Image: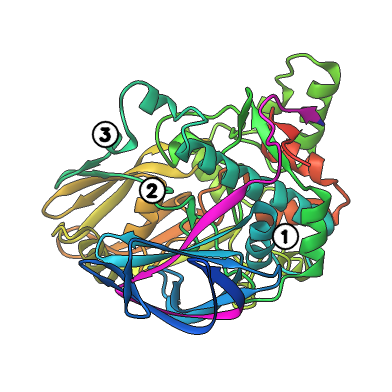
Amino acid sequence: MESSSRKYHCEPQVKVGIVSGVTIHFALNGPYTVLGRKAVGAQTVEMTPSGIVWNNEVYPELVFSPLADDASFSLSDVTIGVNFHWERKETQTFLGTLHLIKNGDKVCAVNELPVEKYLESVISSEMSATSSLELLKAHAVISRSWLLAQMKKRKGEQPTDEVKAQGKTAADEMVEDEDRIVKWYDREDHTLFDVCADDHCQRYQGITKETSPHVAEAIRLTRGEILTSDGEICDARFSKCCGGVTEEFQYCWENSPKTYLKAVADTAEMVKSQEDKNKNNRSNNSGNALVPDLTVEAAAERWIRSTPPAFCNTKDREVLSQVLNDYDQETTDFYRWTVEYTQEELAELIQRKTALKLGRIRDLVPLQRGKSGRICLLKIIGENHELIIGKELEIRRALSDSHLYSSAFVVDKAGEDADGFPKSFTLHGAGWGHGVGLCQIGAAMMGAKGYDYDRILAHYYPGASLTKLYV
């Protein structure tokens, strides 16, 4: 365990944006203090041009501080699953401090609490209580790392990405016109709080759902532990299933490669190769031979049409139940999957998703693939127009009512109409999600096979160091 030159003196607090609205209804379930007064029970605040109205008085902001460790507050009409098919509103309950602040013409409710308490909720939402302890410990470390990296960037304590250092922003690299749509989606720089409570950052539901004792133990055993690289906290990403090889950061987000987010074959052989390299303390290129060059179209096609062995190539229901919700477990073809469209279905879908009238679709042509075989630039050849689209999530959204499992796919066309346009398209794909960093299903299998959490982390984040940031 390395020591860090940038240790916190104590556990930091995180501010989480929960909900915004012109009116917010909430309940203080225990004793709180605000403006030197004690408050409890049902409350309502409303945003007006003059400020935040509470109990017929106007305030620039309000801070409700708990008078007991177990005091909680409940917020009504919290939206979860934003922009997903299961989006809905519910009442959620939280520990810690409640900040009510101005957010344009709305009131924003922000929950402030210790990082470790926040993580108990996040990991309980993300993982099953049946998960192995080593998997939960690994997830605790990467969730903590990701969170603290975002907090440091927001406070200006950690360098921004290379493109920003050169005077550019991620938006400068994005293009959106009738010929080309190349953009990506990442955590926006929140100005009123550190992170939001939805999947856009990390899903946080306070104590609405019971925290698993197993999760609490994993948080306790890894307290203050993060991943670092070159003296900075790692921006530790993760996805459901890499499909056999993990992806590199720059193929999914801005063009700023990260040394610890490299393409890794999700196999025991790769783990051994990495450990031999570290043990000998010398360069070892044997691991490179384990990763096929999936940036080459022919190699990517062979790979995607096959089912090579990998940690995440499993149908073990006990392992899958650690990572997948009940409804996700109904589908087990995420390692290799197939989607079929008629010409009419695909043409209508692309027009609806891109707002461009390409007409009948002649072909879907990969222009660039990442190291995992995921397409990051795709040319759609239409009857009326050609469109280049990227990066991976934009491709997945354009070719599905919700999201394709991943952008690692090859296309079969069948039949022709009188004008030579294909009558149907079949997409054969690999993996689930962007594939960068930890592969949740692969890591669950590693845990089941007896790998410790530090070996799991070393596999998915090569070269990163496990660091104790605070005690």
- Dot 1: element: loop
Residue drawn 81% across and 65% down? 214
Residue drawn 46% across and 40% down? 154
Q: CA distance from mark 1 to mark 3?
A: 41 Å
Residue 200 colored in magenta in the image? no
Q: CA distance from mark 3 to mark 2?
A: 20 Å
The residue labelled by disc 2 is 191
325 left or right of 286?
Answer: left
The residue labelled by disc 1 is 314
Residue at the far bottom: name it. Answer: 42
Q: If you read the primary sequence from the N terminus, does the residue marked by circle 2 or circle 1 appear first? A: 2
Q: Are marks 3 and 2 in contact (CB under 8 Å)?
A: no
- Dot 3: element: helix
The residue labelled by disc 3 is 172
How is the rendered protein coloured?
rainbow
Vertical comparison of 94 with 306: above or below? below
- Image quarter of the N terminus: top right
